[in-house]
């Protein structure tokens, strides 16, 4: 895994920093995707992999960020995508339709 160095200057905005971190996290996620989809690993183990590998890459240096709603949404979308991969798609038991992720 590559390093994700935080380098804030007057020319580099938090938005650019967030995009860079998400790009690094996405790269890490794709490298770990086979492990996350491996059926013999428990969900708890997959969540630990997610927290200790993928999210550490994304949030490295993030304690200094002052995020707008847009950047928070980007981070939430990324997190939801990874969690959907871990938990898999869900169907409603009664209607057999795919459950809505957002109500």
Image (spheres, rainbow, N blue to C red):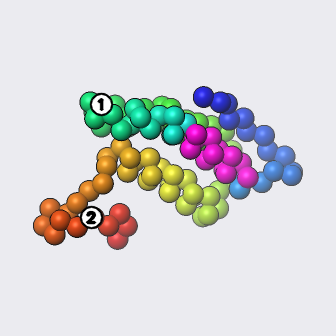
Q: Could you tell whether 61 is left or right of 77 in the image?
A: right
Where residue 81 appears, x then y in whole percent? 45, 52
The span shown in magenta is: 16-27
Residue 72, disc: none
**Camera-side residue: 83 or 68?**
83
Q: Are marks 1 and 2 in contact (CB under 8 Å)?
A: no
Label 2, on which residue? 98
Q: Residue at x 51, y 40 (%)?
A: 29
Label 1, on which residue? 41
Q: Residue at x 62, y 40 (%)?
A: 24
Does 17 appear in magenta? yes
- Is residue 44 at all visible to an observer of this figure? no
- Is residue 20 at all visible to an observer of this figure? yes
Does 90 appear in magenta? no
Gap between marks 1 and 2, in whole Å?
24 Å
Reading the chain from its start, which is encountered first: label 1 or label 2? 1
Q: Residue at x 77, y 54 (%)?
A: 13
Where residue 82 appears, x then y in whole percent? 44, 47
Compared to 67, does 53 lie above or below? above
Quadrant of residue 102 within the rendered picture:
bottom left
Disc 2 is placed on an element classified as: loop
């Amino acid at each position: 895994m590559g390093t994700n160095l935080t380098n804030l200057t007057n020319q580099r905005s938090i938005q650019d920093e967030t995009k860079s971190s998400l790009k690094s996290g996405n790269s890490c996620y794709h490298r770990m995707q086979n492990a996350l989809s491996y059926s013999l690993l428990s969900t708890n183990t997959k969540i630990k992999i997610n927290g200790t590998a993928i999210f550490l890459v994304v949030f490295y240096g993030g304690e200094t960020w002052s995020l707008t709603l847009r950047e928070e949404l980007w981070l939430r979308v990324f997190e939801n995508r990874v969690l959907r991969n871990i938990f898999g798609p869900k169907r409603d038991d009664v209607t057999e339709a795919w459950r809505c992720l957002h109500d």
